[in-house]
């Protein structure tokens, strides 16, 4: 079975499950399934129309959901906990998961020859000439933009760039990407400003799931065993989760609170590089801290003249032969200043994926 046939078979099976194949006579809408999974409707749609291949953890959700009719016993529908399934339901879940993973493996095997291996051999910000590059910066919420004096379009001193949440990271990165790719068009956009052609270019995403919905959507589509927890407020700074069940490990920022003042001592940040799920001949890169300083720090890891070459060499050596990888690193903050992480030092690397021998 080639990649196209495998993709069609998997997409058809997922659609069939939802439209009655899971339980005869019961039709489930994409919106209902997306709500139960806690993901976007476009993600469900993309898996059924062959625009993307669901990561394994989403196939596990399908298998669990369709293993028991208790999933649809109440509205809204819900995903039953794995530890709450009966022996019979676990048997059904296992059989369905093996089937879905087998279909997915057919897609991955057929596509392997067309997928690039090592994402870069020199500068991670240098791409093939004449290929468009889009930097997607998180957008400040309206409540925060309202506090800025020149963020109102009606102000004579209006500054359009004040809409971006990670200005320091974006300006740092834009200069390096432009310098490394003089023959390519480099666009800077907020998530809401993206056009279809931007999605299929080389995508560089700044910021996380709180203010950049493209980052959230991409993380739902790719095979990455890392989950970012939302940051409701500085008293609950969230973090990155790795693992399942009792083996879940949380990497969280370190803060100090004195009275009402919260000081960030150490952020955690994700660097992720993989083929673009919307166009496998392009790449997607995520630079994402729990706070803006973490995003800036992980960008600086590959732009800072003192560290970029050694960090790039480390990535090239460490992940040679793989087409996607990630690092969760600590970003130290001293006297309010961001210190560039040195990835050749294990103390900065909190988690690396995949594990290679």
Image (cartoon, rainbow, N blue to C red):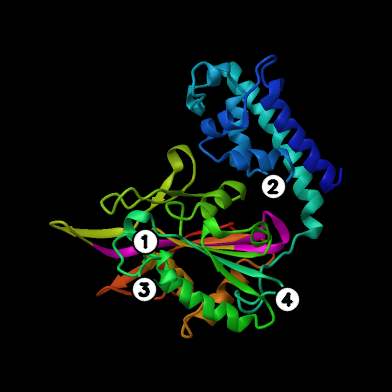
Q: Earlier in the sequence, mark 4 or mark 2?
A: 2
In the picture of the structure, the residue carrying the numbered disc 2 is 52
- Structural distance between the alpha carbons of marks 4 and 2: 25 Å
Q: Residue at x 79, y 53 (%)?
A: 111
Report the magenta residues as a range: 263-284
Q: Is 274 one of the magenta-colored residues?
A: yes
> Which quadrant holds the N terminus?
top right
In the picture of the structure, the residue carrying the numbered disc 4 is 130
Q: Is 31 one of the magenta-colored residues?
A: no
For this rendering, which residue is in front, 246 or 205?
205
Q: Earlier in the sequence, mark 3 or mark 2?
A: 2
- Structural distance between the alpha carbons of marks 2 and 1: 29 Å
Q: Earlier in the sequence, mark 3 or mark 1?
A: 3
Q: Nearer the viewer, mark 4 or mark 2?
A: 4
Q: Nearer the viewer, mark 4 or mark 3?
A: 3
The spot of residue 82 in percent (x, y) is 51, 28
Number of the label disc, if any, that sits on residue 156: 3
Please tell me whether mark 1 sits on a helix, a strand or a loop: loop
> Which quadrant holds the C terminus?
bottom right
Mark 2 is surrounded, within 10 Å at the Cα level, by few (under 14), some (14 to 19) or many (20 or more) other residues, namely many
Please tell me whether mark 2 sits on a helix, a strand or a loop: loop
Q: Residue at x 65, y 83 (%)?
A: 182
The spot of residue 221 in percent (x, y) is 61, 48
Please tell me whether mark 3 sits on a helix, a strand or a loop: loop
- Structural distance between the alpha carbons of marks 4 and 3: 37 Å
């Amino acid at each position: 079975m080639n990649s196209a046939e495998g993709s069609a078979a998997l997409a058809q099976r997922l659609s069939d499950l939802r439209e009655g194949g899971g339980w005869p006579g019961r039709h489930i809408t994409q919106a209902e399934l997306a709500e139960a999974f806690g993901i976007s409707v476009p993600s469900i749609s993309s898996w059924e129309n062959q625009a993307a291949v669901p990561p394994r953890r989403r196939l596990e959700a399908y298998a669990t959901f369709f293993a028991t009719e208790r999933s649809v016993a109440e509205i809204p529908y819900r995903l039953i906990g794995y530890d709450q399934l009966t022996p019979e339901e676990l048997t059904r879940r296992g059989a369905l998961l093996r089937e879905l993973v087998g279909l997915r493996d057919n897609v991955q095997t057929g596509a392997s020859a067309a997928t690039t291996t090592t994402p870069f051999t020199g500068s991670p910000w240098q791409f093939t000439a004449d290929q468009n590059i889009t930097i997607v910066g998180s957008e400040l919420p309206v409540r925060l933009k309202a506090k800025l004096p020149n963020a109102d379009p009606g102000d004579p001193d209006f500054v359009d760039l004040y809409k971006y949440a990670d200005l320091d990271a974006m300006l740092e990165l834009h200069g390096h990407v432009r310098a490394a790719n003089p023959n390519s068009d480099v666009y800077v956009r907020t998530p809401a400003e993206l056009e279809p052609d931007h999605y299929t270019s080389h995508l560089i995403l700044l910021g996380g799931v709180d203010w950049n919905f493209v980052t959230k959507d991409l993380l739902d589509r790719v095979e990455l065993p890392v989950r970012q927890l939302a940051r409701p407020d500085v008293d609950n700074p969230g973090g990155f989760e790795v693992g399942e069940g009792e083996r879940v490990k949380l990497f969280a920022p370190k803060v100090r609170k004195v009275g009402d003042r919260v000081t960030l001592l150490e952020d955690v940040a994700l660097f992720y590089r993989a083929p673009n799920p919307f166009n496998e001949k392009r790449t997607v890169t995520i630079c994402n801290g729990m706070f803006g300083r973490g995003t800036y720090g992980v960008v600086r890891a590959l732009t800072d003249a003192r560290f970029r070459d050694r960090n790039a060499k480390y990535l090239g050596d460490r992940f040679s032969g793989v087409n996607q990888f990630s690092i969760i690193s600590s970003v130290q903050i001293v006297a309010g200043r961001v210190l560039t992480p040195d990835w050749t030092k294990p103390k900065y690397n909190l988690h690396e994926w995949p594990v290679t021998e």
